[in-house]
């Protein structure tokens, strides 16, 4: 059996070997991200069957690193939740790396490809690790590379956006480290399973626990785009190159979300009242994101605010964890959001290729100039809206239903209001894309048929949206297993430390 | 005089609280710099202050008053090493955290250089978008 550690080791090797490939041929570095992610996706898919054996119907493997057993050494965990998020990350990364074939990064190009692989590597590491300090290290790998990628265009605007992101991100991760320090100071362990066990047994002072919860939410909320900490999102999405933006929304935000869910559900435990906090943060993020999206002219900013709104919806669903249904909906929505937003951003990149104007007026009528790309964009858009036959329908339905089921009717109503606002601005956007005649400039811009590889990657994502929309069973096993892994602490603890 | 200083810093008078106190102070000074200062370089320095505060906190968590560094030598081998050294784990963590902090600072300063090239100023209130 191949080991999950290869999911981290291979990208690490490939990332730092990019300059060497560049010495052989100038064209080679362009191919490296795609081949790296193709290999890691293949490894991940070959590992999936091991998840669904055993008596509970799913199973969690703990991989020991360097021969020291879990409570003392670092371990990787490969359970349904980790595998599910790793799969999201790999799929989006694979599609974005296909887009890279058609994209000319700012010089030096090797640096761009290296950072691109490192972001995905860090996110995969965050998702797979079983040690909380290791999670911090991977969080920093992800975030430092994404600061660099945000600022890589070296224009004034991108430097500003990068600095904003860096300031919030590094403050956030320092606070996360402070939370880890508090936990270590009281419990003298860094292994997540053992931390969870000790907290469950009540070895931690409730006041310290509360401080740790707040520090973790603030620390991870920067990556997960929570309300007071998401000031960097619109600027970064506007200033960063398009493939980077799809990685930011599909990979970095999802890794932050996973870390938040893992820490709050498995380590802290939901009996401590953290769910109310998540509900409030979630609904505020959702409504503020959707309301701000209404006023945007620039499509990148519009999608950025819509992305904030979607992340709010996921956090809200995680807060409805009293009912497993909302939680299942939340994880499902994480998948849909990553795939659909990744697809939309990549499609937007092709729509504005060779043209480089991003506001609605300039892109009006693109449906006639670049029909196939706009069609793919529309698939992502309709899935985000939650129309039946698209994958977004199932997740939104489960979230609303689950929230009502767990008695949070007010939050369910507010989430529905958020969806209505979403319909308003997306309908207006569709009106611009299809309803008007394309300008001369748009017709003369780069043809979509010259961007074959990028279209291939996007078609791949769109196929997932439709496939899961029509046949959700394809993925529900994962999500049910993932929810169980996150919520049932005893399963997680006993899988890693052995019987209790 | 030196006797007085020795008594002042002995465990009976101050204890390890002095480390916790100074780490909180460092953290707050850094936070003040990040929130209030207008100069981008000063903000970057504030970030390093915050990191130092957290690092000092981590180290002091693992410090046991009067114990020695966790390096195995002949004298330690004679007795029971585990009872005579401080907790080595936080020191390993801090080493990692310091390296990460240096990377963040380097990244921040290189972005500041680009901003200075483009706008000719380091004052954030003169740069149009950098407000929230």
Image (cartoon, coloured by chain):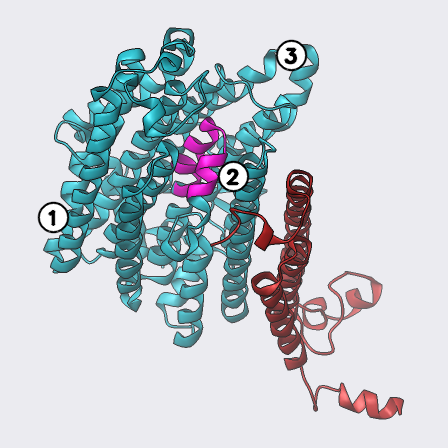
- Badge 2 marks a residue whose secondary structure is helix
Residue at left offset 66%, top offset 39% = B114
Q: Earlier in the sequence, mark 2 or mark 3?
A: 3
The N terminus of chain A lies in which quarter of the figure?
top left
In magenta, the rendered stretch is A234-253
**What colour do you see for chain A?**
cyan
**Chain in red in the render:** B
Q: Mark 1 falls within which chain? A: A
- Picture coordinates of residue A351, whole percent (x, y): 37, 19
In the picture as drawn, the residue positioned furthest to the front comes out as A440
Which one is earlier in the sequence, the residue at label 2 or at label 1?
2
Contact, CB < 8 Å: mark 2 with mark 3? no
Q: Kindly identify which residue carries mark 2.
A: A122
Does label 1 lie on the same chain as label 2? Answer: yes
Instruction: Point out the frontmost of discs 2 and 3.
Output: 3
Characterize the magenta stretch by its predominant secondary structure: helix
Residue situated in front as seen by the camera: A190 or A284: A284
From where the camera sits, is residue A145 visible?
no
Provide the residue designation for mark 3: A26
**Residue at numbered disc 1:** A401
In the image, is residue A54 above or below residue A485?
above
Density class for disc 2 (Cα within 10 Å; few <14, some 14-19, many ≥20) is many
Q: Are marks 2 and 1 in contact (CB under 8 Å)?
A: no
Q: Residue drawn at (25%, 53%), measured in percent from left and top?
A: A316
């Amino acid at each position: 059996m191949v080991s999950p550690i290869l999911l981290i080791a291979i990208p690490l090797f490939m990332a730092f070997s990019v300059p060497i490939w560049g010495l052989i041929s100038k064209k080679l570095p362009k191919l490296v991200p795609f081949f790296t992610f193709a290999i890691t996706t293949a490894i991940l898919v070959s590992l999936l069957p091991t998840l669904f054996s055993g008596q509970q119907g799913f199973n969690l493997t703990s991989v020991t690193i360097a021969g020291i057993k879990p409570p003392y050494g670092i371990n990787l965990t490969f359970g349904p939740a980790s595998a599910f998020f790793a799969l999201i990350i790999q799929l989006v990364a694979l599609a974005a790396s296909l887009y890279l074939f058609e994209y000319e990064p700012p010089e030096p190009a090797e640096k761009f490809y290296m950072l691109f692989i490192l972001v995905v590597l860090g996110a995969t590491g965050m998702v797979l690790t079983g040690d909380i300090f290791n999670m911090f290290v991977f969080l920093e790998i992800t975030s430092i590379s994404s600061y660099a990628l945000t600022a890589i265009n070296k224009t004034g605007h991108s430097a500003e956006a990068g600095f904003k992101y860096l300031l919030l991100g590094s403050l956030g991760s320092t606070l996360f480290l402070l939370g880890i320090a508090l936990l270590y100071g009281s419990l003298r362990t860094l292994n997540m399973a053992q931390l969870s066990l000790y907290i469950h047994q009540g070895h931690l002072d409730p006041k310290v626990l509360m401080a740790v919860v707040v520090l973790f939410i603030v620390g991870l909320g920067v990556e997960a785009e929570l309300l007071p900490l998401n000031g960097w999102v619109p600027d970064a999405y506007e200033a960063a190159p398009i493939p980077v933006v799809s990685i930011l929304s599909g990979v970095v935000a999802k890794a932050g979300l996973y870390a938040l869910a893992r820490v709050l559900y498995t380590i802290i435990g939901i009996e401590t009242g953290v769910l109310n906090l998540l509900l409030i943060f979630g609904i505020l993020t959702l409504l503020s994101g959707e309301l701000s999206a209404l006023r945007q002219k620039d499509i990148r900013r519009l999608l950025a605010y819509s992305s904030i709104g979607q992340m709010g919806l996921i956090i809200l669903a995680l807060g409805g964890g009293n009912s497993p249904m909302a939680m299942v909906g939340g994880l499902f929505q994480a998948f849909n959001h990553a795939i659909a937003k990744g697809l939309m951003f990549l499609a937007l990149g092709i729509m504005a290729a060779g043209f480089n104007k991003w506001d609605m007026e300039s892109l009006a009528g693109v449906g006639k100039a670049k029909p196939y790309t706009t069609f793919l964009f529309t698939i992502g858009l309709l899935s985000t809206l939650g129309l039946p036959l698209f994958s977004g329908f199932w997740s939104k339905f489960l979230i609303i239903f689950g929230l009502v089921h767990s008695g949070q009717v007010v939050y369910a109503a507010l989430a529905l209001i958020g969806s209505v606002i979403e319909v308003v601005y997306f309908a207006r956007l569709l009106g611009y894309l299809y309803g008007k005649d394309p300008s001369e400039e748009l017709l003369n811009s780069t043809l979509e048929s010259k961007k074959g590889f990028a279209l291939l990657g996007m078609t791949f994502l769109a196929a997932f949206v439709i496939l899961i929309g029509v046949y959700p069973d394809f993925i529900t096993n994962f999500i049910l297993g993932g929810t169980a892994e996150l919520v049932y602490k005893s399963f997680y603890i006993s899988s890693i430390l052995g019987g209790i | 005089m030196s006797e007085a200083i020795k008594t002042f810093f002995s465990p009976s008078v101050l204890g390890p609280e002095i480390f916790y106190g100074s780490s909180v102070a460092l953290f707050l000074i850094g936070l003040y710099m990040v929130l209030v200062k207008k100069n981008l370089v000063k903000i970057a320095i504030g970030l390093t202050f915050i990191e130092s505060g957290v690092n000092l906190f981590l180290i002091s968590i693992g410090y046991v008053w009067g114990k020695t560094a966790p390096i195995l030598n002949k004298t330690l081998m004679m007795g029971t090493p585990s009872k005579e050294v401080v907790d080595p784990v936080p020191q390993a963590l801090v080493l990692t955290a310091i390296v990460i902090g240096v990377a963040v600072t380097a990244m921040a300063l290189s972005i500041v250089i680009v901003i200075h090239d483009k706008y000719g100023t380091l004052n954030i209130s003169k740069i149009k978008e950098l407000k929230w």
